[in-house]
Amino acid sequence: MSQTKYVVVCSDGTSYDLARKAQVTEWGKPKTARFDLEDLLAAGWSPVRETGMGGGEHAAYALVVLEK
């Protein structure tokens, strides 16, 4: 049985594993940069789907679904 993870990947190169249940950013405060996608790929997770989101006045980002 496969496992699934969801990662938000931002256009600035940062990425955030949503399974960590840690707040990505608070309004008006700078976000702490994380690079979770790189670590997950190195641990054997594979991307199976990507959905582009965001843009406009803010940095673009995508939701990536990973399976292992």
Image (tube, rainbow, N blue to C red):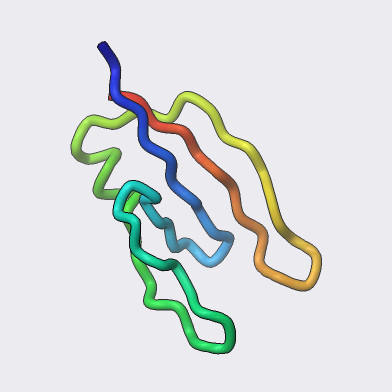
Q: How many labels does the image show?
A: 0
| Residue 38 image point, x, y percent | 31, 49
x then y, percent, for residue 63: 55, 44
Q: Where 7 sits versus 65, above or below?
A: below
Q: Of residues 32 and 43, which is closer to you in this image?
A: 32
* Residue ID at (38%, 72%): 33
* Residue found at the far bottom of this picture: 28
Q: Which residue is drawn at 25% across and 11% down?
A: 1
- Is 42 drawn above or below residue 44 in the view shown? below
The spot of residue 20 in percent (x, y) is: 30, 54
Whether residue 19 is situated above or below residue 13 in the rendered picture: above
Q: Which residue extends farthest right?
A: 56
Residue at 50 percent across and 87 percent down: it is 29
Image position, residue 32 (x, y; %): 38, 77
Q: In the image, 35: left or right of 15?
A: left
- Residue 45 placement, left or right of 53: left
Residue occupying the point 43% across, 40% down: 6
